[in-house]
Every structure is written in C-alpha cells, then in structure tokens.
Image (cartoon, coloured by chain):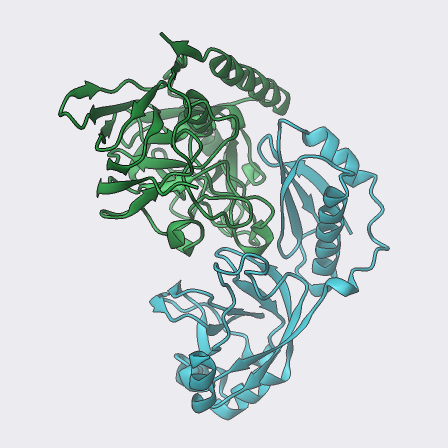
Chain colours: A cyan, B green
Amino acid sequence: MLKKLNNIGDSAIVCDFGDEVNQTINKEVIKLFHFIKKQSELEKIEGILNCTPSYNKLVISFDLKKTNYKIVSDFISSAQFTNLNYTQEKKQWNIPICYDFEMDLTNMSKELKLDKEEIINIHTKSTYFIYMIGFVPGHPFMGDVDKKLFLNRLKTPRVRVPTGSVGIVEKFCNIYPYESPGGWNIIGRTPIKLFNSKDDLNPCLLSPGDSIKFKLISKKEFNSFANE
Amino acid sequence: MSDSFFKVLRSGINTTYQDEGRFGLQHLGIPPGGCMDQKSFLVANAVVGNKKNYGVIEFVYQGPMLKLVKGKTKIGITGNVHFKIIKSNNVIIDGECDRSYNLKEGDTIDILATKKSTYGYLSIEGGFKLKPFFNSVSTLVKSKIGPNRGNKIKVDDKVIINENSKNKNNFKATNSSEDINIIRVLKGPQYNYFSEESKKKFFSQNYKITNLTDRMGMRLQGASLKNIISTNIRSEGITKGAIQVPADGQPIILLTDHPTIGGYPKIANIISADYDLLVQKTPGINILFKCISLQEAEQLYKSNCNNISKILKSIMEII
C-alpha cells in the first residue's frame, strides 16, 4: 500500500510504501513504476524524467519547466493502479553460474556450518526476485536468499571484484555488472553480460520485477560462454 | 556530410562530450548525466547560432588545445574561461567568453584555464558529429556510456564537425552572473534523523568544498552532523543535489553523475535554481546553506529560467 508522498528537493517526489522490505510490497512499487511510465508515454502526465523503484519506494523526478510537485502528487493520489496487472512485463531468466570462481565459499562454509556443496545446492534451488536495478548500470538487487545462507557484509570490502561475480549479503543476492570494489560474499561468477552500452535498444538484460534462477555450469562451459 | 575535424593537441582535464542529459533510464542504473552547468550549455549553443541544443565539449579547470585540421567552423566558449585563438598566420587573439569566433583551416584554440570556476564549455555551429545513446550524447565515463566509447577526449583524438559553418557573422551574449556563497536547500527526506544541534549547525556554519569533488559528488568539510536514528537507510532512488550524510558526519552533495540509488540519510536537497551556481564553485570555497520552502524554490526556479531566457534573447550580431 502506498503510505505517503513527499517532495525530494523541488523536482522529485518519493512514493513511500512503508518500512518493510518484502516482495509483496516491492511488487506494488513496481506496479506504480509501470503505471507512471505508461501514463507518461500516453502523455496523460507531462514532464516525467525518471522513475526509480527501490525496495519500498518509488522516486519520480520531473521537469520543473513542465510540471511541479503538486501536479504530480495529485496525479498519483488520484491514480487507480493497485488493480492493474503487469504480468506481461515480468520475465523469468536462467542465468548460468560457475561456482569455481567463488572467493568466499571456504569462509562461508565455516561460518554457516555447511559444506560447500550444500551451500551451492541451496543457492541454486531458490528463485530470485529482482527488487531493483541500480547503483551502477545493470546491477540487480535480488532476493530472497534461503535463511540458511544469511551472512553479513565482508568486514573489509574488496578493492576489486571481477565482472559477473555473484554475491550474497543477508537475504539479498547480487551480480556485479562491472569490475568494482565490493563487500558482498562472492560465491560464483556468471559469464552473462548484464549491461551492454553498445546495445541502444536493450542495454540492460534484467529489469526490476523480473526473476532469475541460477543454472550451474562447469569452468569449461563458462569459458565457452565467455568466448562467444 | 563533412569530414571536417579538429585534432586534439592537448586533452585538458576530464574533457568529455555532454548535453542536457539522458532521461528515462534511471531504473536500469543510469543517472541523467549531462552538462554540469546547464545554463552555460544553453548559452554555448545560442552564441554559435544553433537553433537546437547540440552536444558540447565540457572541460574542468584546464581545457583542450584543438587544431582545426580540415574545414571551417564557428566556435563559442562559455563559463569563465581564459583562452586564446592562434590563427594559421600565427596572429594570437585573446578569447572572450559568451561570443562566437570563426575558425579557418589551420587555426588552433588553446583553452588555458577556467577562472575562479570549475567547468567550461566549447560549442560549434551545427554541433559535433556524435552517435547518440538513448537520445543523448552525454558521456558517463565511469560506466563507459556515450560517445567516444564512453571515454574522455584524449590527445590525438579527432573531434569531428557535423557541417562546415554557413554563417559568416558572429554573435555575442550579455551574460552576468552573481557569485554568492549562499546555497539554498529544501529539507531532505531524512532531515529528522539529525540532532537538533546538528540541524542548527548545518544552517549556520560554513562548509568547505574539498578536493574530493567530481561529476559524481562534492565532499564537504565542516561541523560534523550527528545522526540520532540510523546512519543507514533502505537504499532508495537518488536525485541530483541530494545532500547525504554518511556515518562520519561530513556531508556529500550528489551531483550530475550520481549513483542511481543510495543508502545514506539525506539531510537536504539543493534547489534547482542554485545547482549551476554550486557546481561552478571550486575546492576551498566555503558555502553556507539556507533553508527555504518548496514554494519559494519553485518561484526561484521560474525567475532563474527567466534570467536564462533574457541572456539567450540578448544575443546580438557583432558588427
């Protein structure tokens, strides 16, 4: 449920769905996201520049030359979007993962008191829902990780996490689209490119609201994927 | 079609192609980007007679040195910039901002430095020949997005011109800018996460702009802000001008190439009307935040737009 609307600066609005983080709430956020995007495309609302869904909020930025906080917040308050169905927008993905590229399995095994195979089995079994994409282009925040695998962030973040690394923190799972510093527990790597700046139609593979399942591959398969 | 081009003899600092920005992709992790100082961007296009806002070259502190190897063009430089034009016959002209100059084959522009400001802009009549990505030619260097394969412009690069100059006349804008160090803000979404004393300090003490400032953000140094609720929040969408405060209590203003989502509490947001003024300030300068209402911010935005329109309308042919 949409709980409240507030301005962020003079040219953005935050739609707040409450403090909880779960898929039910996030699906409402994503519903409003699709609704605003559609209404903006249909020119039912003017001046929308960006809509950014996160776990429990939607931030909408607008062009102050064309609209303002009052107009946008009135539009959202009077919108009937909860009954809308956006199933056609959701995609299911199978993402190959090679666990040979793990960086933290030994420590995880110690901390979780599970052997490595068990951790891998538990990780591949779940379906991961994409709560949001962001921080950097194409970076998915997914969940929920099985309770047995809950872990904190690394005490000292790594300076360099390779592209495609798959990480876990608490109930969330991510994939690094670029080589970057990072504090997540790395359990494997995917050869799939999440972001392609040369593709000017669909540069980003995943979208908020999609879900993925990991499919275990060998190092040999990883290399043949990577060479494609 | 033309194959007219400049050769880059010196790249300058953080020299990139930029325009008004790239919108509608923040849900995929791509911030709007674009020229840091949008007013200078608009004036840059107008002084070379462009009816449309083409991408321009943005530089920081020191600009590039460019030699027109082939063709003829009309250039304009905006911001507060010290530059020279070296004609092919070795005559040197001291450049003046906010006006246009005609360049012929063999002429060189040497953009030496910005004066008491950070960003400068170079525009040409008809624009540079660039391939847009989602309707924008802005470069997001960190993610390798945009023209020039998402890279900064470097020495020996070719800067290609869309079409040779058609108009012999030159133009000049009357542009005045005020240089005040008071930056107006609205209370941020987590304003109440901070102690009463910290809120008071935030609006009464100077914050110094540090060297840790780039297109992504501006780190400030001043009274430490004490968070009384939580130094982390659930990550949420970021907008430019948000002032976030991490656990060390020193504010960071998120700028044009900001991360798309973030998990630090935000004490305030820069108003749109003061954004261009803020980004032009250099490290070492002290700024003072002033809290105003949303209605005032909207009014100030309107008068700011009117001022820009006035500058654009002031453009006259130079006789």
- Residue sitting at 60 percent across and 65 percent down? A206
Q: Is residue B318 visible from the viewing direction of this image?
A: yes
Q: Position of residue B216 (x, y in %)?
A: 41, 44
Quarter holding residue A40 = top right
Count of numbered badges drawn on the protein:
0
Pick whichever, B21 or B223, lies toward us.
B21
Pick whichever, B312 or B118, lies toward us.
B312
Vertical comparison of B94 with A131: above or below: above
Q: Position of residue B142 (x, y in %)?
A: 39, 53
Pick whichever, B154 or A68, lies toward us.
B154
- Residue sitting at 75 percent across and 39 percent down? A43
Vertical comparison of B196 with A172: above or below: above
Left or right: A108 in relation to A85: left
Q: Residue furthest left?
A: B90
Q: Position of residue B201 (x, y in %)?
A: 42, 28
Pick whichever, B127 or B194, lies toward us.
B127
Q: Position of residue A155 (x, y in %)?
A: 38, 67
Left or right: A99 in relation to A128: left
Left or right: A18 in relation to B168: right
Left or right: A31 in relation to B195: right
Q: Is residue A109 visible from the viewing direction of this image?
A: no
Quarter holding residue A11 = top right
